[in-house]
Amino acid sequence: MPQSRKWQLTFNNPEEHGFTHGAIVEAIENLAAVVYWCMCNEVGSEGTYHTHLYIVFQNPKAHTVLANAFPGAHRENVKGTSQQNRDYVLKDGEKYNKQSDGSYDYVDSSGKRHVGVNHSDTFQEWGELPREQQGKSKDVEKILALLKDGADNLEIVEAVPSAMLSIDKVERTRSLLRDKEFANSWRDLTVTYIFGKTGMGKTRSVMDKFGYSNCYRVTDYKHPFDTYDGQDVLIFEEFRGGLKHGDMLNYLDGYPLLLPCRYFNRQACYTQVFIITNIPPDDQYLNVDSESRKAFHRRIHHVVEYRDNGRVAEYESVQAYLDRHRWIDDADEPDPEQIGMEA
């Protein structure tokens, strides 16, 4: 059952199960971001006394939220406007043929007849009834809710087919929502430099670990971020200094950042960066001065080397990688005191 901002709940024989109006209101007050609710008691076609509750939230809620708050109640995410759902709870309007004694008799859209008695004197409501429209406005509302839930473009188009005609607007709205989250906050980045011969599975090892949909691969260094869509993992594929040194330093920092794109810039949301190449880190940016190269090296937290013999060596930093032979040389050099003692 998908998430929804609007839910209809039915409590059969409510008082037998502890769901008086007072108990229902108390449960509602423990829920977050409630915008509006209304409820009313009635006896339906099968003679069962029950309570209808219509509730609207500011943000989409999973059915489990309602299940925990109202165990045993029948739940459904509803269609139509809030006004239409309020009319249903109260059996108000010409379609219900409601009489002064509360009795009603109507046929629903599927052709099923409903006869019962609505107890209007039990009707309660709280909040301001949301004003909604059907059609295009409803589609816009649904798209916005999907974006807030983190849906990708395919999921949005499958839910609202008309969205395929305005994907650019969907992208801009997603960017606005992300801007709000990341525009004023530091991102703790982890930067890993992986190098070795081609065909050794360097890229695949990263994508298998984090999931393909969570990874964005930079392969076009003229327009590197045109299709970036907020992925958490950024991979610079076959990197050989293809980006300006100063730009690369910015991409490897955690400060709020808009990534340059041809159509509209996109907010950087990634927290994991992998630089994948077949050359060691000290072979990058040889055209800049030593201090500038060190600034690039300092932004790298881990170095992983895929060796020709199939072994994988890991280093805690670029400096640790550069010092690897020094440790070997120091270990091989005899202790002068030992030499003196042996003499």
Image (cartoon, rainbow, N blue to C red):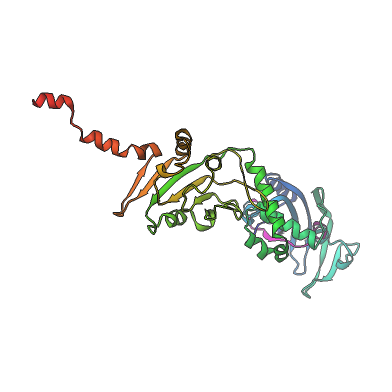
Q: In the rendered view, would you say 119 is above or below 45?
A: above
Q: In the rendered view, would you say 195 is above or below 100?
A: above
Q: How many marks?
A: 0
Q: Position of residue 339 (x, y in %)?
A: 13, 27
User: The N terminus appears in which quarter of the rendering?
Assistant: bottom right
Q: Work out whether residue 309 or residue 10 is closer to the camera in this orientation and state it.
A: 309
Residues drawn in magenta: 69-85
Q: Is residue 342 magenta?
A: no
Q: Is residue 6 visible?
A: no
Q: Is residue 117 left or right of residue 311?
A: right
Q: Work out whether residue 198 or residue 21 is closer to the camera in this orientation and state it.
A: 198
Furthest residue in direction front, as rendered:
287
Q: Position of residue 261 (x, y in %)?
A: 63, 51
Q: Work out whether residue 133 or residue 37 is closer to the camera in this orientation and state it.
A: 133
Q: Is residue 254 visible?
A: yes
| Residue at the spot 48% in from the left edge and 53% down from the top edge | 237
Furthest residue in direction bottom, as rendered:
111
Furthest residue in direction right, as rendered:
100
| Residue at the spot 50% in from the left edge and 50% down from the top edge | 236
Q: Position of residue 187 (x, y in %)?
A: 56, 40
Q: Position of residue 186 (x, y in %)?
A: 58, 37
User: The C terminus appears in which quarter of the rendering?
Assistant: top left
Q: Is residue 75 magenta?
A: yes
Q: Is residue 191 left or right of residue 315?
A: right
Q: Work out whether residue 312 or residue 222 is closer to the camera in this orientation and state it.
A: 222
